[in-house]
Amino acid sequence: MARAFGDRYEAGQRLALELKKYAGRADVIVLGLPRGGVPVAYEIARYLKVKLDVFIVRKLGVPGFEELALGAIASGGVRVLNHEVIGVLPNASAVIEEATERERLELERRELLYREHRPAPELRGRIVILVDDGLATGATMRAGVAALRQSGAGKIVVAVPVGAPETCREFEKEVDEAICGIAPEHFYAVGQFYRDFSQTTDDEVRDLLNRSEQWTSQ
């Protein structure tokens, strides 16, 4: 089977064409989910000539069962809780606070690493295009969307180059606009649709954020 995209940059260039109605608008911001979503988001923001930033989401895992999410925290001090899980957890308050503190430290480390003292962007009332390199289950993206809603974003657009068909359909109902570049019937993993799906590094994320300033500071 031929791969749909050479790499994340090519995927972003193609996805950007589907977002051209947002070009040049001061109220639009493109947020990439680190790390793999940032190269895709960079190409979209570059094409649209709008601000690029990262939106960091950290899952709050149940101790010993980390794949089970109590909720998530995200950039801007937002916390979203999964009340179904919390409702059956003994000592829920203590567990939540412990998980929040642990993940908050990692989130702050990444914020400092990626932004280098630049403040987090104001999202209230803005059109936010939230980008990743693909959607499988959509768990991280869903936590990001919930956090954006809590941050007061005016309109939430989810944009990915490729996604599982069912997940893409779900997001069409959950956000203002959902764009999956392709939603192949035989979807097993995001990486199967990229020739180069090597890991995006922290240095690459920092470099792309710095480079994006060339069109937003004009």
Image: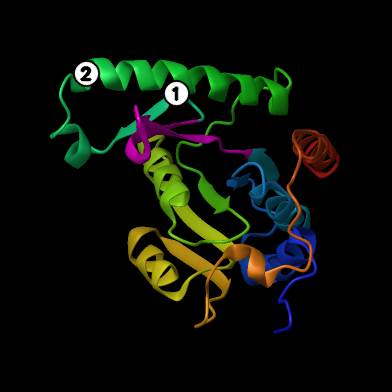
The dot on residue 93 is: 2
Please tell me whether residue 2 is drawn above or below residue 91 in the rendered image.
below
* For residue 11, side relative to residue 122 (left or right): right
The quarter of the rendered structure image containing the C terminus is top right
Residue at image point 77% right, 40% down? 216
Mark 1, other Cα within 10 Å: few <14 / some 14–19 / many ≥20:
few
In this orientation, which residue lies closer to the viewer: 163 or 15?
A: 163
Q: How far from the left and from the top, in percent, is residue 23? A: 68, 59
Please tell me whether residue 98 is drawn above or below residue 18 in the rendered image.
above
Q: What range is drawn magenta here?
A: 54-74
| Count of marks overlaid on the render | 2
From mark 2 to mark 1, how far is it between C-alphas? 18 Å
Toward which corner of the image does residue 34 lie, by quadrant?
Answer: top right
Residue at image point 34% right, 27% down? 63
Q: Is residue 91 magenta?
A: no
Q: Secondary structure at mark 1?
A: loop
* For residue 94, side relative to residue 41 (left or right): left
Residue at image point 36% right, 29% down? 79
Q: Is residue 67 magenta?
A: yes
Residue at image point 36% right, 36% down? 150
Magenta stretch, main secondary structure, is strand
Toward which corner of the image does residue 85 lie, by quadrant?
Answer: top left
The amino acid at mark 2 is Ser
Q: How far from the left and from the top, in percent, is residue 94? A: 25, 15
Identify residue for label 1: 77
